[in-house]
Amino acid sequence: MTPNNTPSYKASIKQSVVGLVIFAVITAGVVSFTRLITAERISKNLAQAEAKLLYQLAPKNEYDLDLNQPLQLAAAPQLGHLQPFTAHLATKNGQPALIILPLTTKDGYSGAINLLIALSLQGEIKGVRIVSHRETPGLGDRIEARKSDWLQQFINRSLSNPDKRGWAVKKDGGDFDQFTGATITPRAVINVIKRSLIWQKTTNEQFNNLN
Ligand SMILES: Cc1cc2nc3c(=O)[nH]c(=O)nc-3n(C[C@H](O)[C@H](O)[C@H](O)COP(=O)(O)O)c2cc1C
């Protein structure tokens, strides 16, 4: 019998293999468990961050907004929603007053920009907040409400204010400011905001035609 073929040698190999398998199974379990906990925490944090932004758009002293009563809307690719999506309706004195829509544009300098827009039922913008983006710090990130007041210029604007031509950055002949050295990000945000106004108008028209 060669030393590699002895029963004790075989037993020790078997033991090592069993040990390795147990180690691999435990490690995989720990990794999956940690991932699960982290994913849950991330989605909870995101939901909390979004809730905070929703209440900035529909302040509690002015509107009633029940986050447990979302509106389910049909897919709207022009708003970045290829699948049915969730929006919110805020009421004032018991009457519907604001629709808050999530919007996504992929036309940012570094990809997707996610935002929330609050529209009055008459089609006026009552607020815009950036939820997430990957734009360059110091350039495109000035779209964020905490970095500049750029979003303020959309307040009370509508599809007719400015007119169609005006819904662009000044560099393209429109009414809205771009940033020095950064036009791509503002252009993307302005375009998706404009698309949301058109979406609201056509959705209202379809709804009115049903009645
Ligand atoms: C490293 C780097 C990062 C940039 N980041 C942004 C950005 O986040 N947003 C943006 O609009 N432009 C950004 N720019 C500038 C754009 O490339 C572009 O020059 C600018 O937006 C003007 O676009 P326009 O010529 O279409 O008006 C960046 C440029 C460089 C070199």
Image (tube, rainbow, N blue to C red):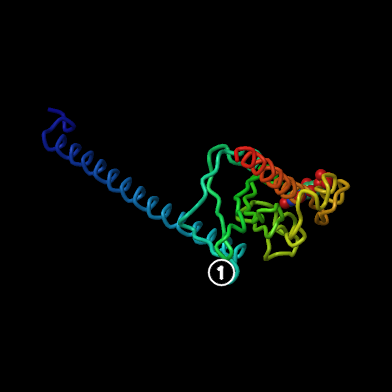
Residue 28, placed above or below residue 140: above
Give the quadrant of residue 94. bottom right
Query: Considering depth in this image, is 65 or 180 the residue closer to the camera?
Result: 65
Furthest toward the top, the residue is 1
Query: Considering depth in this image, is 80 or 211 the residue closer to the camera?
Result: 211
Residue under label 1, please give it: 60
Q: Position of residue 169 (x, y in %)?
A: 82, 50
Label 1 environment density (alpha carbons within 10 Å; few <14, some 14–19, many ≥20): few
Q: Secondary structure at mark 1?
A: loop
Disc tally is 1
Q: Quadrant of the N terminus?
A: top left
Whether residue 155 can be seen here: yes
Apparent side of residue 76 relative to residue 44 in the rendered image (left or right): right
Q: Position of residue 205 (x, y in %)?
A: 67, 41
Q: Position of residue 63 (x, y in %)?
A: 58, 65
Question: Does any atom of ligand 1 lie closer than 8 Å to the CB of label 1?
Answer: no
